[in-house]
Structures are given as C-alpha cells and as structure tokens.
Image (spheres, grey):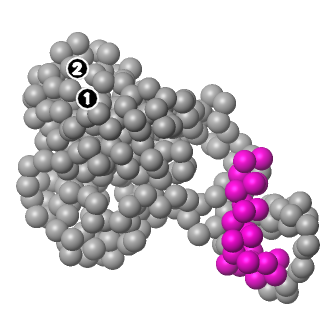
Amino acid sequence: MSAQPMRYTGAPERRAAIVEVLRATGFASISVLSQRLSVSEMTVRRDVRRLQEDGEAVAVHGGVRLRLAETDDDPNAPGYNGRESARNAAKRTVGRSAAACVLPDDVIAIDAGTTTIELARALSSDFHGTVISHSLPVINRLLEQPAVTVIALGGDLHRASRALVGSSTVEMAHRYRVRTFYLAAAAVDERGVYASADVERLVKLELMDIADRVVLLIDHGKFSARGPVFLCDWGRLSAVVTDRQPPAGIAERLQADGIEIVLPNESERTNAAAF
C-alpha cells in the first residue's frame, strides 16, 4: 500500500477507495486508512460501518477486511455453519470440559455460539436443572432432554449467530438469576473479550450481570482471531475453559486477576476450583 496521502472530499469516493485497498490487500487498519485518505480515524470508522451495512466489507478489531461471500453472508447463516465446522474437535473438547463441572440440578445460562453449543450437547443425561438461553441451536438441542427446564429468551432473530437479540431479550433476561453464565466470544487479547456484532453485546452483558460466575468458553483459535466489538475486560470473568494453554501475555493477565484456566488435562489446571 502506498504511503502517499490521497485526499477524498466525498464519502462515496472515500468508501470506494477503501474497497479498492481491500481488494488489493484483503485487510487494512483504521490508522493506515486514516493516513492514506487524509481524514480522521473517526471518519474512517463511519465509512467502515457504512461499508459493512452495504455488505462490502467486515469490520474487525483495529481495521476492516474484505467480505468473503462464502462465510460472511447472512440470509441462511452460512457463516454460522462455517464457524461451527471450524476446529470442531477443539470446540467439543471445550464443551465437554465445561459440562463436567455443571451440577445435576444447576441453574445456568448458555450464550449463543459455536463453542457454547458443544456444552449443551455434552450435558450429562443426569442433568435436570434449568438452562436460560437466547441461542436457537442450544434451545433446539435441549428439546431432546425432557428433564431439563429451558427458559428461551425472546427477541429479534440475528441470523449470523442464530440468536435472539434486542431490548426484549435483555428485559426478559433481567428477571432471572443463574449460578453460571457460559459466555462465547469472537476473539480475545490481552485487553479482554470481543464479540462479533454490536447487537449481541447488550444481551451478553445482561446475562453476565445476572450470573454469580461468568465462564468463558473458547477454543485456541480465538487467541489469534480479531473481533470488532469490545465486550469486557478479563476482570469480569471467573474462569476460562479452553483446549490449549493461552499465550503468555493473556495467561499472565488471567493469573494476575485470579481467573481460573481450565484445560482438558486436569493436571494442567491453574488456580483450580469447581465451577
């Protein structure tokens, strides 16, 4: 990418220039685009939001990438299918590790996500507690377990995550209390946890608020992924269940905050405690 600044006075012209850059490189950071277009980073972010709304690009943490039709289109949620099949063995491992710590009569909430659905699938046949969820796959899976009380949070359908979202979802969640909320994430870094869309953020935050403990379920791919929406810092969590030891920087943050790291091998647990 050329470092020579180019001035664009009109928003459509700027957005066309951003798309041209993305077609050449696949990804560009907000700061680089700001310099290239000679506009503020806030202006670039507005352009990126518009490009995302128009289906031409996808906002990610710190920048924007070209939209990939095979994984990013919404109508029939192929993006969810693609995410569900990616690293599925790792996700099953995370789901089984989390399910092993769910009490038979527990009251829990399960977030929408392709890793958290593996927790629902791994729940013991002896489980006869209560599950609160806004995830359609989780709700459908638990239909097969008649001993489980399922509270489905209503709302507007967000096809990309196959979840119900919006103010009505938040208001309904506010009525309840759970022992543990099993949280999904698009990405994590040393700063904290990220979601993939802003429409998911308020529901996640409300479910965190009604829980005595918040346990993050992530496979190792989330350590190198990028998510566009900052959700929370590490201090909001009680534990992280994953399939591999986190990178050093993240592991140090978790240890400093007293957050349990749960790995498949019981001997690898850090600050181990039942959750």
- In which quarter of the view is residue 149 placed? top left
Dots 1 and 2: beta carbons under 8 Å? yes
Q: Which residues are magenta?
A: 31-54
Q: List the residue tagged with mark 2.
A: 149
User: Is 11 positioned to the left or the right of 171 in the image?
Assistant: right
Q: Position of residue 183 (x, y in %)?
A: 33, 47
Inter-mark Cα distance, 1 to 2: 6 Å
* Local secondary structure at mark 1: strand
Q: Position of residue 232 (x, y in %)?
A: 38, 61
| Along the viewing direction, whichever of 43 and 147 lies nearer the viewer | 43
Q: Of the residues shown, which amino acid type is indicated by label 2?
A: Thr
Q: List the residue tagged with mark 1.
A: 131
> How many residues crowd mark 1 within 10 Å: few (<14), some (14–19), many (20+)?
many
Residue drawn 31% across the image and 65% down it = 234
Residue drawn 43% across the image and 58% down it = 231
Compared with residue 13, is residue 183 higher up or lower down, i.e. above or below?
above
Q: Position of residue 191 (x, y in %)?
A: 40, 71
Q: Is residue 33 magenta?
A: yes
Compared with residue 153, is residue 241 higher up or lower down, i.e. above or below?
below
